């Protein structure tokens, strides 16, 4: 699909896509396979992207960033994924690209000045601490607590899971309860806290894919947090963090599309070159039609992701568009990757051809950061007004 994507972009975005594509071309499939196999963070790739200014593309110019919108950031991550880096490449970047959005919108001046320039330069790695073992999607049940320390600050106790990049990160955007135990979503506060190893225990969770970037269980044992590290207003943390969720959906949709596209490209090439019974296997409609279907689905999902990003950048309501983009992209990506494995047959199951890695990482999109089922709940209940199930 790389032949026609640029027609959906404006002139600046085409230049962005071309420049990112050039940078990513330095890191081939073997590089990503090695990082994944050895559970090694892709430092060389990260530094190359930081040097190009792509890590800080959505951070305001006054703090050293590019000052661009979420749509331009989506173009960056789409190209990263489609290069073959897939989620290993995107996850190395995207928490810095979008994760600090609540700090940009609600952080105090000291917080912005201390951390945004370093993030824009690629010097600061940021983790995202929301999900808990006993809460999951039910954020209102978060039990990690921030207790007043008597000096204006807090001490944080609790446990988070699926905290990506915790091993590499200096700080974590952390959601903790400051209200009483029955305060639900209204009693949560957001902090940009240090991951101080004297008070924090970090352990990687063994998982099926995207192993160049660890997902971690993080235990907090009295982590001290100064007063100025509160993001926004006390007990309004969930409302603040919502401002990062729609951009997150848009960026993950763009990544999913990129993974599907690189899988489809590999499958199309193989179906053209592989000869069985004296003809290319792509001549068989049982092979070619699913690949054509995958292309159409990916194209539609990418168009929706761009539409959602443009609505967000224009200050328009974009919840339905962002969630629709994420849902369609996750489905299209996995379908394309699954058909790529099927097209290559036994070779699709072999690491040498890389499509099995795309398949593993495309599968992730259907469960993280929100399941397809919860996305459908949002559309059915919040957008369409159907009776609520929870």
Image: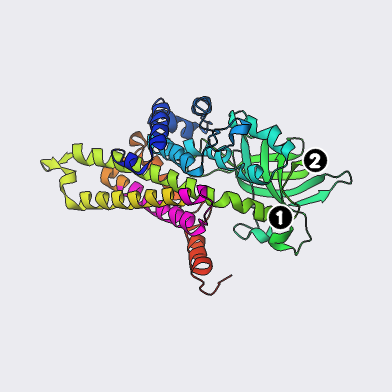
Q: Is residue 119 visible?
A: no
User: For residue 320: magenta?
Assistant: yes
User: For residue 22: magenta?
Assistant: no
Q: Is residue 362 left or right of residue 41?
A: left
> Where's the C terminus, which quadrant?
bottom right
Helix, strand, or loop for circle 1?
loop
Q: Residue furthest right?
A: 150
Of residue 26 and residue 208, the one placed in the foreground of this image is: 26
- In the rendered image of this protein, does residue 236 appear above or below residue 255? below
**Residue 236: mark in rendering:** 1
Identify the coloring: rainbow
- In the rendered image of this protein, does residue 113 appear above or below residue 284? above
Q: Residue at x 51, y 41 (%)?
A: 69
Q: Residue at x 27, y 53 (%)?
A: 293
Residue 74 in picture, x, y percent from top left: 46, 42
Residue 66 in picture, x, y percent from top left: 54, 33
Graded by Cα atoms within 10 Å as few (under 14), some (14 to 19) or many (20 or more), the crowding at tag 2 reads: some
Residue 216 in picture, x, y percent from top left: 61, 43
Q: Quadrant of residue 138?
A: bottom right
Q: Quadrant of residue 226?
A: top right
Magenta: main secondary structure: helix
Q: Residue furthest bottom?
A: 387
**Residue 226: mark in rendering:** 2
Q: Is residue 38 visible?
A: yes
Q: Which residues are magenta?
A: 310-339
């Amino acid at each position: 699909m790389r032949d026609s994507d640029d027609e959906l972009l404006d002139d600046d975005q085409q230049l962005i896509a071309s420049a990112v594509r050039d940078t990513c071309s330095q890191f081939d499939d073997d590089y990503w396979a090695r990082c994944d196999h050895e559970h090694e963070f892709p430092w060389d790739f990260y530094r190359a992207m930081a040097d190009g200014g792509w890590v800080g593309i959505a951070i305001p110019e006054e703090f050293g960033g590019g000052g661009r919108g979420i749509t331009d950031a989506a173009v960056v991550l789409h190209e990263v994924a489609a290069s073959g880096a897939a989620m290993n490449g995107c996850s190395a970047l995207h928490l810095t690209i979008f994760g600090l959005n609540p700090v940009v919108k609600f952080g105090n001046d000291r917080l912005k000045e201390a951390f945004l320039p370093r993030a824009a330069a690629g010097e600061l790695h940021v983790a995202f601490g929301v999900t808990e073992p006993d809460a999951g999607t039910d954020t209102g049940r978060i039990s990690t607590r921030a207790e007043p320390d008597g000096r204006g600050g807090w001490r944080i106790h609790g446990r988070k899971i699926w905290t990506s990049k915790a091993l590499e990160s200096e700080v974590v955007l952390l959601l903790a309860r400051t209200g009483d135990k029955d305060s639900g979503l209204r009693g949560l506060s957001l902090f940009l806290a240090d991951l101080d190893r004297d008070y924090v225990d970090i352990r990687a969770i063994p998982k099926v894919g995207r192993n160049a970037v660890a997902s971690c269980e993080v235990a907090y044992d009295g982590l001290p947090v100064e007063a100025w590290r509160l993001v926004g207003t006390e007990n309004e943390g969930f409302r603040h963090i919502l401002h990062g969720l729609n951009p997150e959906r848009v960026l993950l949709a763009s990544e999913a599309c990129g993974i599907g596209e690189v899988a489809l490209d590999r499958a199309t090439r193989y179906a053209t070159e592989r000869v069985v019974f004296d003809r290319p296997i792509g001549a068989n409609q049982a092979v070619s039609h699913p690949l054509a279907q995958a292309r159409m689905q990916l194209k539609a999902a990418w168009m929706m992701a761009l539409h959602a990003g443009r609505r967000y950048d224009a200050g328009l309501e974009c919840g339905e568009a962002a969630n629709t983009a994420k849902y369609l992209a996750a489905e299209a990506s996995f379908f394309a990757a699954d058909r790529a494995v099927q097209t290559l047959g036994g070779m699709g199951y072999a690491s040498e051809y890389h499509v099995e890695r795309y398949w593993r990482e495309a599968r992730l999109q259907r469960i993280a950061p929100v399941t397809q089922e919860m996305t459908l709940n949002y559309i059915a209940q919040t957008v369409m007004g159907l009776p609520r199930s929870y």
